[in-house]
Image (cartoon, rainbow, N blue to C red):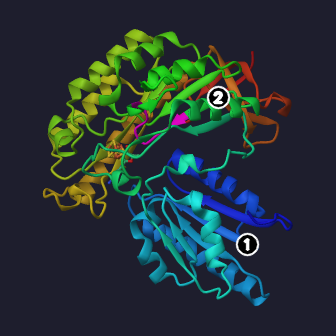
Amino acid sequence: MGTAAQKKKLFVKTWGCQMNVYDSQRMADVLAPLGYATSETPEDADMVILNTCHIREKATDKVFSDLGRIRPHKTAKAERGEKMLIAVAGCVAQAEGDFILERAPYVDMVFGPQTYHELPEMVARVQDAAGEKRIVNTEFPTVSKFDLLPVEQGVHGPSAFLSVQEGCDKFCTFCVVPYTRGSEYSRPVNAVLDEAKRLIDSGVQEITLLGQNVNAYHGEGSDGAIWGLGRLIRALADIKGLHRIRYTTSHPRDMDDDLIAAHGEIRQLMPFLHLPVQSGSDKILHAMNRKHKAELYFDVIARLRAARPDIAFSSDFIVGFPGESDTDFEDTLKLVDTVKFASAYSFKYSARPGTPAAVMKGLVHPKIAEERLARLQSLITGQQLAFNQSFVGQTMPVLFERLGKKQGQIQGRSPYNQSVYIEAASENLGWIKNVLIQEGFDNSLRGILA
Ligand code: 5AD
Ligand code: SF4
């Protein structure tokens, strides 16, 4: 490792899922021993990393337009005889590595989600005496990056992400994840517990376990057995000082009995689950290769509600998937109407190059997809508002994380991950406090300290 004599500025911009947020923090951890400290702006940075997302449309365009904005900063530095390294990381990098280097000659490094632990070597190589080396690193190494990353050291608020599983073997026909993140990998139990303990020692009270398919977790335990997510959550709940546990994102098919039971038994496991279903039509679910019918989803929801009556759900939906008829779409609306979600995300289908759905027939006219999206979103927004308003007059524990948008406000999260804001002193930040809810909106709640 080089000496950290002079502090260098690192700017990281993150798109996409929480896994990318976690990865960005770990990239900063890897670069810290080289003297890089993160900064809030790209101006004057010694290194800029764009950590990209490829899941939905226009991903590549967005990266190029951001690169275009960063380029003048690099030129300005070069005119002063200084260097700015520009790196593109994440899933767009994984999918479009060579194309990025070709189209943006000022980009120095392109690397995928599985190789960022090699950043020190990559930096050394681009800074090599000749000075003109550029790097594409989109391998899927045989040794997991988790075995090679340094101990995490980022500064955390009271809530932190912990990556326990990565990659996906499900191959939903619309999705790039199996190609950009690779096949399923679960970190060993001890590695997860050790990271959790360090986070808790540093003041973290809430941990969100991350994985593209987190409930397919099957990590090796110290007893040599393979542990599922339910068992891992039980072990985490035994660590003193951890008050809240969440996990995301899950697949309905991987909700096993033990995990469902854990929802009823583990007090720290929050009563809120993001469980994407994508569509309510069996025909579309089949075409999406989700490998289950709507019935299974209803069954899983019912079992979770039996285990934990106050549990609430969110989901992801795709409208306008190839072949989606009016009736198929009506089935999605019916599903939403039956389940009643606390919140949900809905997207217009976008063909991702290289995925099986990209060559499917029966394209839905963009105007129809747009109309369906608007109808679905209005149904969901109504449910979200009703859910939020149902807490008015009730007291709920809120973990306060940050200052609010307006002066004198602080903001936190309820057990249902609702954003709650109150007027209170900033010394409440970092603590779980009871809040009397006074008003519910589409995306937030307002209250007072109880
Ligand atoms: N088009 C539209 N939405 C997509 N998603 C994933 N791939 C696509 C695509 N090709 C959505 C899914 C997934 C969420 C993270 O993004 O709903 O659950
Ligand atoms: Fe993509 Fe399907 Fe895997 Fe989720 S389960 S990451 S949607 S392939």
The stretch drawn in magenta includes residue 187: no
Identify the magenta region: 209-215
Disc 1 residue crowd, few under 14, some 14–19, many 20+, Cα 10 Å: many
Q: Residue 139 at x, y = what percent?
A: 43, 63
Q: Is mark 1 within 8 Å of ligand 1?
A: no
Q: Give above or below for 48 relative to 374.
A: below
Q: Where does label 2 land, which residue?
A: 206
Amino acid at circle 1: Asp
In the drawing, what numbered circle is on residue 46?
A: 1
The x and y percentages for residue 285 are 21, 39
Asked if the residue at label 2 sits under 8 Å from ligand 1, the reply is no
Quadrant housing the C terminus: top right
* Residue sitting at x 64%, y 35%: 195
- Residue 210 forms part of the magenta stretch: yes
Residue depicted at x 45% and y 65%: 138
Q: Amino acid at mark 2?
A: Glu
**Depth check: 401 or 382 in front?**
401
For the image, the number of numbered tags is 2
If the image is split into quadrants, where does the N terminus sit? bottom right
The picture quadrant where one finds residue 68 is bottom right
Q: CA distance from mark 2 to mark 1?
A: 33 Å
Q: Is residue 409 at all visible to an observer of this figure?
A: yes
The quarter of the image that holds ligand 2 is top left
Residue at 83% over, 33% down = 426
Residues packed near mark 2 inside 10 Å, few (<14), some (14 to 19) or many (20 plus): many
Q: Residue at x 34, y 14 (%)?
A: 303
Q: Nearer the viewer, residue 22 or 373?
A: 22
Q: Is residue 66 left or right of residue 306?
A: right
Assign a secondary structure to mark 2: strand
